[in-house]
Amino acid sequence: MNALPDSTVVRADPAYTRPTGRALAKWKRPRTWVSIMLLSISASVLCAPTAPAPFFDGVLHARSPHGVYTEIRFEPHRLVAQVHGPHICVLHAHLVHGDPHISRYAIEPPQGGRFCDELVDGEIVIRPHSSNDVMADFRSPRMRWSGEFRRFTPDR
């Protein structure tokens, strides 16, 4: 006796026939977009350019008419002074006292350059005239240089 195949079709409930991955994708889709948006916002904040440190340039003078071009970059509680030729060196100093009228920075031990070596145990005194102009005195027991410095702007 030959049995005929059962011709009745059993239909399952459509809610149970969807692939699990598709249901999971629909459930995670809103969370994925929120995550992507938060990551892109975080990345844009991290990659955004920070405001540059105030940068001033000018000429330091001693008793002679010849001066030394110098750049001063102010950082939080510190400053970095780059002295150009013929006395090439870089000075780092940390804030000792600061108020709106005068700021005193103690010079840290330099890493070379005769000019900077002469400023060991010295200080840099900054007197602002305005937000764009400052007077700087570089003092040590062996020497004293001073000069007027202007805020650096690319258009000048």
Image: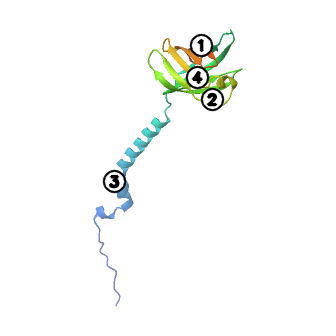
> In the rendered image, which residue does mark 1 sit on?
147
Residue under numbered circle 3: 27
Residue at coordinates 39% horizontally, 59% vertically from top-left? 21
Give the residue at mark 2.
110
| Residue where numbered disc 4 is placed | 122
Question: Which amino acid is tagged 3?
Answer: Trp
Q: Nearer the viewer, residue 77 or 12?
A: 77
Name the amino acid, label 4: Gly
Task: Please say if the residues under marks 2 and 3 sit with CB atoms less than 8 Å apart.
Answer: no
Residue 62 image point, x, y percent: 65, 12
Mark closer to the chain start, 1 or 4: 4
The three-letter code of the residue at mark 2 reads Pro
Question: Which is nearer the N-term, disc 2 or disc 4?
Answer: 2
Quadrant of the snapshot with the C terminus: top right
Of 105 and 3, the residue lying toward us: 105
Q: Amino acid at mark 1?
A: Gly
- 62 above or below 110? above
Q: Residue 14's spot in the image, x, y percent?
A: 30, 62
Name the quadrant of the N terminus.
bottom left
Q: Could you say whether the residue bearing mark 3 is in a helix, strand or loop?
A: helix
Q: What element does badge 2 sit on?
A: loop
Look at 49% across and 25% down and name the residue there. 96
Q: Are marks 1 and 3 in contact (CB under 8 Å)?
A: no
**Which residue is outermost to the bottom?**
1
Position in image of residue 63 (x %, y %): 66, 10
Q: Earlier in the sequence, mark 1 or mark 3?
A: 3
- Vertical placement of 3 versus 61: above or below? below
Q: For residue 139, say whether it is visible.
A: yes
